[in-house]
Image: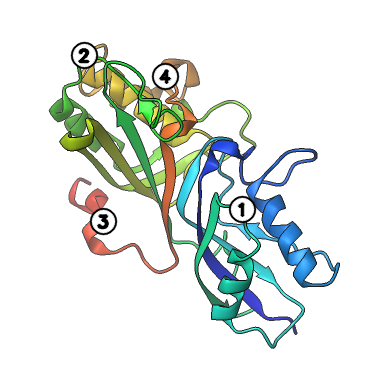
Amino acid sequence: MMPRFKMTMAYDGHLFHGFQKQPNQRTVQGTIEEALKKMAKGQRIVVHGSGRTDAGVHALGQVIHFDFPNDNIPANRMVLALNSMMPTDIIFKDAEIVDEDFHVQYSTHGKWYRYVVNQDRFVDPFKRFYTGHYPYKLNVSKMQEAALDLLGEHDFTSFAASGGQIIDKVRTIYYVKIWQKPEENEIIFDFIGNGFLYNMVRIMVGALLEIGNERRPVHDLKRVILAKDRQEVRNTAPASGLYLYHVFYEKVPEKYRLDKKNN
């Protein structure tokens, strides 16, 4: 039996063509698998990720698992070994050896995504790859009120980009928080749910920004959800501001279960 490693990592997605391995493209999965192949003396090791972040999307708490053909490497040594082989835009934070029935994608209880919007008048050259840019007036309190309409279980077809292959569009949003970071002139959007569709977070942010800019009524998201029509929200926030912040492998804590208080 080969030990199964579960590892938490962070990466700067700017120079990656997403997480998933693709031919002739620099990807997170491909980079890790290449390093593991060297460690395993040429044997191919398949890396599984908790989610497939798109090109330009970042991660602070991505989780992977893989089976490694050497049971003499403890988890802490695997962190050191992989970090010594990673480019500077990937770092492993910790690792543990888990049961063989653990699966990094199917064992999840929830995911936390964060989106960062910079409101400077002009694009900051030092933030352009790490935030979305929205220099227009925003009413944060209206966005906060509107975000409550996303809580609970809904069919999020209106918030799923074309190109996704998942048929069932029903997801549950447990927690939404929109808050300001005045010292950076940034607005932060936090979403926790049992799962997210292709581009779903970026589309929700796009709709909330339109509400904050008073181009949509505050409770328009209720109508959009019921419409089940992607054409109802055409604005998708750029990939640069999105971060996979945390993956839950135990029950999502009650402090993040705002859906129960609103349903």
**Residue at x-position 55% and y-position 43%:** 53
Q: Which residue is mark 1?
A: 87
**Mark nearer the N terminus (3 vs 2):** 2
Q: Are marks 1 and 4 in contact (CB under 8 Å)?
A: no
> Which residue is at the far left?
141
The disc labelled 4 sits on which kind of residue? Val
**Mark nearer the N terminus (3 vs 4):** 4
**Residue at x-position 38% and y-position 28%:** 132
The disc labelled 1 sits on which kind of residue? Pro
**Mark nearer the N terminus (1 vs 3):** 1
CA gap, disc 1 and disc 3: 34 Å
**CA neighbours of label 3 inside 10 A, class few (<14), some (14 to 19), many (20+):** some
CA gap, disc 1 and disc 2: 43 Å
Q: Position of residue 1 (x, y in %)?
A: 75, 85
Task: Count the numbered circles shown.
Answer: 4
Residue 214: give its label: 2
Q: Are marks 3 and 2 in contact (CB under 8 Å)?
A: no
Q: Position of residue 94 (x, y in %)?
A: 49, 71
Q: Are marks 3 and 4 in contact (CB under 8 Å)?
A: no
Q: Which residue is mark 3?
A: 256
Q: Nearer the viewer, mark 1 or mark 2?
A: 1
The disc labelled 3 sits on which kind of residue? Tyr
Q: Nearer the viewer, mark 1 or mark 3?
A: 1
Residue 233: give its label: 4
Res 98 visible = no
Quick one: 85 or 44, which is closer to the camera? Answer: 85
Residue 123, relative to residue 172: is it above or below? above
**Mark nearer the N terminus (1 vs 2):** 1
Q: Secondary structure at mark 4?
A: loop
Judge from the rendering whether residue 223 lies leftward or rightward of residue 180; answer left or right. Answer: right
